[in-house]
Image: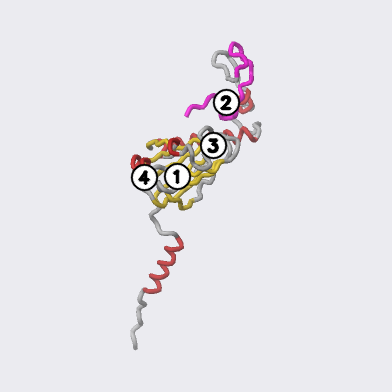
């Protein structure tokens, strides 16, 4: 992922710099400094203290995306599968403003949904059988974590070619779901089984005098 100087702070490139002029781009031909980077380096070192909240939030988004791309194995090593061709007419889908794809590595599948519109989106994402075959995805119940908006919260979601995967995407945002096949028993069921085993276990009788 390439970040142009100041992009992570929302640089508007509104200066008229030398030969470049006021063309909506920061110059690469002239000796110039970029306003947003000047503000961040005002103390002589990088600092967010002098930046407006909107810039700090945008930089945090870029930081999380870049770190995820660097550390998440499915992004680093995984196969790619484009989901656009089966979702042009899906519920809530606008192919001009939304983008969908999968990455898969080992037993982990990542569903990425991006929203370039200025309104929230709720999309029923179709995942074709070809994706399951090509990426060797195990259909069925998965432990699902939305890494971008609700990290640390795990819920069970179904992955199947006949069942759309519902996603909510904030305006100008993204949803990144990490899914791994669910293999364990639900916690409540596990506790009931343990209690049943303890109740059925024979107790030792003491010796009579």
Q: Residues within 10 Å of mark 3 (few under 14, many from 20)?
A: many
Q: Residue at x 48, y 27 (%)?
A: 2
Say whether disc 3 or disc 2 marks the residue closer to the N-terminus. Answer: 2
- Image-based side of 5 in relation to 188, left or right: right
Position of residue 37 measured from the top left corner of the image (x, y, whole percent): 60, 25
Say whether disc 1 or disc 4 marks the residue closer to the N-terminus. Answer: 4
Q: CA distance from mark 3 to mark 1?
A: 18 Å
Give the dominant element type of the magenta stretch: helix, strand or loop: loop
Position of residue 155 measured from the top left corner of the image (x, y, whole percent): 48, 52
Residue nearest the viewer, comparing 152 with 101: 101
Q: Which residues are magenta?
A: 1-23
Position of residue 109 measured from the top left corner of the image (x, y, whole percent): 41, 43
Q: Residue tagged by mark 4?
A: 137
- Image-based side of 48 in relation to 110, left or right: right
Say whether disc 3 or disc 1 marks the residue closer to the N-terminus. Answer: 3
Q: CA distance from mark 3 to mark 2?
A: 22 Å
Say whether disc 2 or disc 4 marks the residue closer to the N-terminus. Answer: 2
Q: CA distance from mark 2 to mark 4?
A: 39 Å
Position of residue 200 measured from the top left corner of the image (x, y, whole percent): 37, 74
Q: Residue tagged by mark 2?
A: 6
92 inside magenta stretch? no
Q: Give the quarter of the image for residue 55.
A: top right
Q: Residue tagged by mark 3?
A: 115
Residue 76's tag is none
Residue nearest the viewer, comparing 126 with 71: 126
């Amino acid at each position: 992922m390439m970040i142009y100087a100041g992009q992570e702070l929302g640089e508007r490139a509104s200066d008229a710099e030398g030969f470049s002029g006021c063309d909506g781009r920061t110059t690469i031909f002239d000796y110039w400094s970029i306003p947003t980077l000047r503000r961040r380096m005002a103390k002589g070192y990088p600092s967010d203290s002098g930046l407006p909240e909107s810039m700090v939030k945008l930089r945090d988004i870029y930081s999380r995306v870049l770190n995820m791309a660097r550390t998440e194995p499915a992004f680093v090593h995984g196969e790619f599968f484009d989901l656009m061709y089966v979702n042009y007419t899906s519920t809530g889908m606008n192919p001009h403003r939304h983008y969908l794809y999968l990455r898969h590595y080992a037993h982990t599948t990542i569903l990425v949904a991006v929203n370039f519109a200025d309104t929230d989106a709720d999309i029923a994402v179709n995942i074709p059988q070809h994706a399951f075959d090509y990426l060797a995805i195990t259909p069925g119940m998965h432990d699902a974590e939305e890494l971008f908006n609700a990290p640390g919260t795990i819920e069970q979601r179904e992955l199947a070619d006949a069942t759309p995967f519902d996603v909510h995407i904030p305006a100008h945002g993204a949803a990144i779901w990490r899914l791994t096949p669910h293999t364990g028993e639900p916690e409540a069921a596990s506790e009931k089984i343990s209690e049943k085993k303890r109740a059925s276990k024979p107790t030792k009788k003491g010796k009579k005098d």
